[in-house]
Image: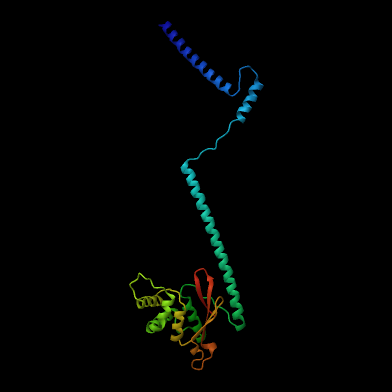
Amino acid sequence: MKLVKCFRGTGKRSQLQNKEIELKKAAAKELASLGFSHNGNDKSNTDNLVKAIAGVSVAPQQGHPNTSKGAKRREKRAQQEAAREQRIQEEQSSIMSDRMIEGEKFERKLKPLGFTIKEIKPDGHCLYRAVEDQLSLQSGGSSPYAYQELREMAAAYMRKHASDFLPFFLSENAIDGDSDDSPAEKFEDYCKEVESTAAWGGQLELGALTRCLRKHIMIYSGSFPDVEMGKEYKSDGGSSSSTGTIRLSYHKHAFGLGEHYNSV
């Protein structure tokens, strides 16, 4: 039994030795392909090692296709965001420039007349609030009409005199060709917006107010010619124009939202 064990142990060592020899041969063959030899010349082997390293080219690591696409998408979004920010800055710069120019024009126009501009809240009711402020100045106290009452008065007058206002309404408001509503029905919807929403007012509403209030209205502009309404009321009942005239300023570039009215 002891002899058998010894023989088996010897066989295993022999197998390991053979495996080691094979590995050494493979390593020697690989080194030989790189210019190494077993002649003991360390300097020569070192030179060959340097040459072998110098000849190795490192290929760029290929990223996962999904990662590459994701990076491209992120880069594209970043470029789009940068372009958007640039447009916003350019628009804001343009708005500020236009606003300053408009303000300078107002100052040159109103200062010689002894007038200044009173800022009105830009909430969609600015036209009516500006008229309310003017009525307060004329009465020396509170206005006889609040801005909401002025809205209702303008809408009621336009309804009652629809034939006078409808042509102007149609010229300023495109009618949807697919709509079944008639122009008269569209005009009625418009009047409802005037009296019950914060819809911005314009010349239609001012035309109605000048007749409701029997007041001369002067609209100063820094970007367009001044507009005068209700000239027939310029001197009503012996009152002077400075007392009876409602003076507003029309601003095209005051805010990014668009048109705005202030009290003068």
In this view, the residue farthest toward the front is 177
Give residue 196's quadrant in the image.
Answer: bottom left
Task: Give the residue displayed 62% in from the left and 26% down from the top.
Answer: 49
Q: Position of residue 203 (x, y in %)?
A: 47, 79
When the figure is inspected, residue 79 is found, relative to residue 113, above or below; the finding is above
In this view, the residue farthest toward the bottom is 238
Q: Position of residue 166 (x, y in %)?
A: 40, 80
When the figure is inspected, residue 240 is found, relative to residue 168, above or below; the finding is below
Task: Give the residue displayed 57% in from the left and 70% down from the top.
Answer: 98
Mark count = 0
- Which one is in front, 153 or 202? 202
> Horizontally, is 147 left or right of 49 in the view?
left
> Horizontally, is 187 left or right of 142 in the view?
left
Give residue 27's quadrant in the image.
Answer: top right
Give residue 144's quadrant in the image.
Answer: bottom left
Quadrant (top left/top right/bottom left/bottom right) for the C terminus? bottom right
Q: Where is residue 64 in the image (x, y as percent from the top left)?
A: 48, 40
- Which one is in front, 162 or 192? 162
Task: Give the residue displayed 57% in from the left and 65% down from the top.
Answer: 93
When the figure is inspected, residue 146 is found, relative to residue 239, above or below; the finding is above
In this view, the residue farthest toward the right is 43
Q: Position of residue 95 (x, y in %)?
A: 55, 68
Quadrant (top left/top right/bottom left/bottom right) for the N terminus? top left
Task: Give the residue displayed 47% in from the left and 14% down from the top.
Answer: 15
Report the colour scheme: rainbow
